[in-house]
Image (cartoon, coloured by chain):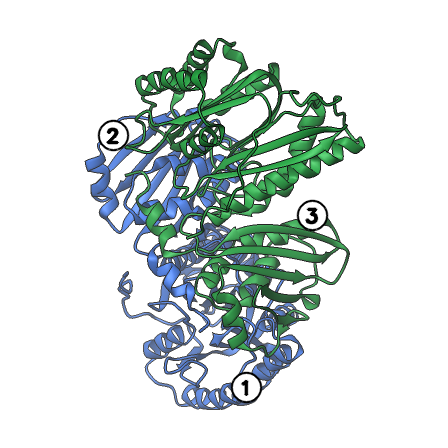
Chain colours: A green, B blue
Amino acid sequence: MFELISQKTINLPIGYKMAGIHCGIKKSKKDLGVIYSVEKANAAAVFTTNKVKAAPVLLSMKNIENNEIQAIIVNSGNANACTGEKGYSDSLEMASKTALALDILPEDVFVCSTGVIGMPLDMEKIVSGITKISQILSTGSEKNDDLLNFANAIMTTDTFPKVYSKEVLIHGKKITIVGIAKGSGMIHPNMATMLSFILTDANIEKSALNKALKNSVNDSYNMISVDGDTSTNDTVVILANKKAANKEIFEDTEEFYIFCEALNEVNTALAKMIVKDGEGATKFLEVEVTGAKTVEDAKLISRTVIKSNLVKTAFFGEDANWGRIIAAAGYSGANFDPGNVYIYLENKVGKINVCQNGHFINFSEEKAKEILKEKEIKILINLREGKEKAVSWGCDMSYDYIKINGGYRS
Amino acid sequence: MFELISQKTINLPIGYKMAGIHCGIKKSKKDLGVIYSVEKANAAAVFTTNKVKAAPVLLSMKNIENNEIQAIIVNSGNANACTGEKGYSDSLEMASKTALALDILPEDVFVCSTGVIGMPLDMEKIVSGITKISQILSTGSEKNDDLLNFANAIMTTDTFPKVYSKEVLIHGKKITIVGIAKGSGMIHPNMATMLSFILTDANIEKSALNKALKNSVNDSYNMISVDGDTSTNDTVVILANKKAANKEIFEDTEEFYIFCEALNEVNTALAKMIVKDGEGATKFLEVEVTGAKTVEDAKLISRTVIKSNLVKTAFFGEDANWGRIIAAAGYSGANFDPGNVYIYLENKVGKINVCQNGHFINFSEEKAKEILKEKEIKILINLREGKEKAVSWGCDMSYDYIKINGGYRS
C-alpha cells in the first residue's frame, strides 16, 4: 500500500559494483545478488541475537572477525537456516564460488540468505547463478539499474525495494553512504532484524566503523517492530573501502560524529521503509516517548507500545483506543507513574489529546477519526517526569498479515 | 468455534450464593454479577503485574490484605481503568452499596471490573443493578442457573462461559472447589491474566491458601497466551469459607497437597478454556517442552513459542512451518543447543517428526496436513539435554482476531 519513496538518481560510493538476477530459487522474481568492492574494505556487522543462527550468519560472523571484506553474496527465497552441516558447507561453497568468479579470497566474502527456514538450498541453481552474475559484474551496466536489481534480488515478502543514500563532506572530501535493505516480516527490535547492506567509500578505522554501526543500529533497526518475531538470519553489514581518499576517521573526533550522523540518517530511513512495508501494513506508526527519567525507560515503553498486537489492531480499525497504549506502557517494565501520563495522536491533519494524567478526557471522536484515517500517525506519550526521550516505528496489523503468514511456506 | 465443554450438574461448595443480571452497561447481555459467602472466607488473590492498575484492582488489593472476604461484585463492559479519582470512588461505592444490600462490611467486599479502558462507569446503572441482584440473592433460585448467570455476567468478548468443578476428600470431609473465569483477549502469561473466581468450602489456613494459589497460577494462567498483551484488571481470587468443616489445612501437609492438586486441576481447566475461547481462535495449541536443563528454560521456550504471531498464523494456515517454532525457541532467551532439538506435531489423528537435531528432515506433508486440519494440536519440543519440562497453552491467530480487535471499543 505504500509507494516506493521517490529516489533521486543515487550516486554510488566510489569503487563498488553490484548486480541482481533470477537464478531459480524463486519462481520468477530475482533471487541472487552480489556486491563487489574493487578493493578490500573495512567491515563491521551486527547479527541476530537469536540462538538459532542460520549457516550464512555463522560463516559471516567468522569471516568478518578475521578479514577485510571484498564481496557480499545474498540469496532470497531460502534462509539456509536449520539445515545442519549441509547448510554450512553450502554457505562455504557460496563464498568459494563467488571468490573464484571474482578472483578474490573466499574468506573475504560475506554470505547472507533470507527466506523459508529449514529447507536445503538448491546449490546447482546458486552456483550457475554466481557464474551468470559475475559476468554481469565484469561487463557492467547502468549503475542505478544494478543497484535496483540487487535491491530487488534480496526481497522476500517485501513489496518494494529499500534504498537510501547520503553524501557528506569530511576532511574536504565527498563521502557517500548508500544503504540497501530488505525485510517485512519477522521484524522485531532485538539487534539487527533484517538484512541491510551499507556501502561507503569513507576511509574510517575499523573500530570506529564498528562503534558507529552498533550505536546507529540501536536507534534505528532496533526501534522497529512488525510482529515481535526475531529472525534467524538478520544481519546489518557496512563496508568502507577508503576510495573517497579522505584522511582516516578515528573514534570520537569531529569527523567521526559527522560520519555517524550521516550513517544514522541512512539507517533510520531504511528502518522506516521496512516497517512501512510491514506484512499487510496499512498504517505507518511512530511512537515518541518524552519526559522519561532515563533513555532506557523511554525505549522500553516506546518499543512495547509499537509491538502490542492490540495497539496495532486498534489502529488498523481506526479506533482511538488509547487505553491499549497506556496498558502496553504499563506492562513494558519501565519505571513511571501512570498518573502523570499525557497521550496525543498527531499527523498532518491535526493533533488531539486523548489522555491526561493517565485517565480519560472528553475528546472529539470526529477529529480523532480524521487523524486515524490517514496512513501515517504519531503516538505521543509524555511521561512528564524527566528529560529523556525515544522514538520507535512500526505498522498496524491487518487481515493481510494473517493471509501472508498463514500460507507463507506453501 | 469451540463449544461449551459439557458440564455435569455442578455441585456448588457449601455456603455460597451467586447471581448475574443485565444492568445496562452492555446493550442487552448480562453485565453485573455477585458472589456471596454466608460466612466470612479466608481469601487469597493474584493481581496483574501491569503498572497501570484499574481502580477495582487497587481497592481489592487493599481489602484482601486486611480482611476476610464475604462478597465479590463484578461488572463487565467497562474496566474502570484509567479513570482517575472518580474511578476509585466508583469502586468504593460498588463495595459500599453491595455491603449495604447484603448487610456485610464494605471492606469485606472484593471488587472487579472488565471491559473497555478509559471510560467512566455509569454508576446509576451499577447501583440500581446491585439492588436488583441482592433481591435475587435473598430469594434464591436454582443454584446451577445462578452460577451460569454469574459466569455469563462477567464475559466480554468471550463466546462461552467458563466453569469447572472438582471434589476431593480431605480429613474424611468432602471438599468442593468451583472456578468461574472470563477472558479471551489481552491474555498473556505474566501473573493472572484474566478474571478468575475460585470458591471452596475448605477450611484452610490463610498462608497455605495463598501459597496454593500462587503456585497454581504459575502453572496454569501464567502458561497461556492469546495476544501477548497483559491487562490492567486481571485478577485471580480464591475464597475458602470453611463450611466443609474439615480439620484446618496447613502448609506442606499431605492434605495441603491433595488440595493443591485439586486446585491445579480447576485452574488448568479454566486456563485452557480461556485460550480455546481466544479472540478469533480456530485452533487450540499445546506446547510441551521436554528435555530441558531447568524448568525456567522449559517455561521460557514454551511461553515464547505459544506467543509468537508467526507460529500462531502458521497454524491458522495449517502450515507445518516448524522453522518458526525453532526460531521462537531461539529468541526466547533460554539456554539450549539448537543442534539437539527434535520437534513433533501430534493429535488424535497421528504424530509426525518435523525436525531432528535442529534441522529439516523429509516428512510427509500429507500426514502433516491431516494433523493440522484438526482443532487441537500438540507441539512437542524435545531439547534432549536434561529432565525438566513445561507445558503452555494458546490458540492460533485468525482474521477474526483482527476483526474483533480492530473495532472493539466502537
Q: Is residue A343 left or right of residue B41?
A: right
Residue B305 location, quadrant: top left
Chain at tag 1: B
Q: Which residue corresponds to the image point at 61% horizontal and 59% vertical from the top-left?
A: A330
**Which residue is farthest right?**
A253
Q: Which residue corresponds to the image point at 50% horizontal and 44% vertical from the top-left?
A: A274
- Label 3 sits on residue: A296
Say above or below: B315 vs B233.
above
Amino acid type shown at disc 3: Glu
- Distance between the alpha carbons at the discs numbered 1 and 3: 40 Å
- Label 1 sits on residue: B123
Amino acid type shown at disc 1: Met
- Label 2 sits on residue: B363
Point out residue B253 in the picture as x, y percentages from the top left corner: 52, 52
Amino acid type shown at disc 2: Phe
Quadrant showing the C terminus of chain A:
top left
Name the secondary structure under disc 1. Answer: helix
Point out residue A264 in the picture as x, y percentages from the top left corner: 65, 39
Q: Nearer the viewer, residue A168 or B312?
A: A168
> Which marked residue is nearer to the observer: mark 1 or mark 3?
3
Determine if marks 2 and 1 fall on one subunit: yes
Disc 1: CA contacts within 10 A as few (<14), some (14-19) or many (>=20): some
Name the secondary structure under disc 3. Answer: helix
Q: Nearer the viewer, residue B247 or B340?
A: B340
Asked if residue A34 can be seen in this view, the reply is yes
Chain at tag 3: A
Disc 2: CA contacts within 10 A as few (<14), some (14-19) or many (>=20): few
Point out residue B401 in the picture as x, y percentages from the top left corner: 38, 59
Asked if residue B40 can be seen in this view, the reply is no
Earlier-in-chain disc, 2 versus 1: 1
